[in-house]
Amino acid sequence: AELRDEPFVAFRPGSTVRRAVMLGAHNCGFRPNIAFSTANIGTVRAFVSAGLGVAVVPESALAMAGPPLVAVRLVQPRMERIVTLARNTARYESAGVAAVRRLLTDRIRGLRA
């Protein structure tokens, strides 16, 4: 709710993060003022760094190289997204794909612990 008067730099319509932002704002009783919209996380970072607005981004975006940002963790509403790994178990799984699958599942299990 504290962001209601801020201009937002948002991801393009239909993106997962944008839907989460719109829903979160709605649940807090406002509609965000989308000043800029882009599909590129680098552009979002550049616009925010230039002072053109605020943005809700995945935490991983903070580790990216680029212009400086100040991060503020959102406490309310809690926002999360679901990421899914899908594969056809009837098909051959190469050693590389198996390694990536194990890495991802181990990392996700570690986050939940």
Image (cartoon, grey):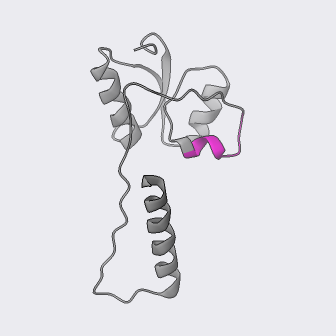
Residue placed furthest toward the bottom = 92
Quarter residue 93 falls in: bottom left
| Residue 2 shows in this picture | yes
| For residue 50, above or below residue 13 | above
The stretch drawn in magenta includes residue 88? no
On the rendered structure, is 106 left or right of 61? left
Which residue is painted at 66% across and 30% down in the image?
A: 69
The answer to whether residue 15 shows anywhere in this view is no
| Residue drawn 53% across the image and 82% down it | 96
The span shown in magenta is 60-67
Query: Where residue 99 appears, x then y in whole percent?
Result: 52, 78
Residue sitting at x 35%, y 35%: 20
Quadrant of image for the C terminus: bottom left
Name the residue at the front extreme: 113
Q: How many numbered circles are shown?
A: 0
Q: Position of residue 13 (x, y in %)?
A: 36, 36
Quadrant the N terminus occupies: top left
Q: Is 61 contained in the magenta span?
A: yes
Horizontal side of 108 relative to 42 (left or right) equals left
- Rendered location of residue 42, percent (x, y): 61, 41
Q: Position of residue 91 (x, y in %)?
A: 32, 87
In the displayed structure, would residue 49 be above or below residue 62?
above
Residue located at (49% from left, 17% from top): 7
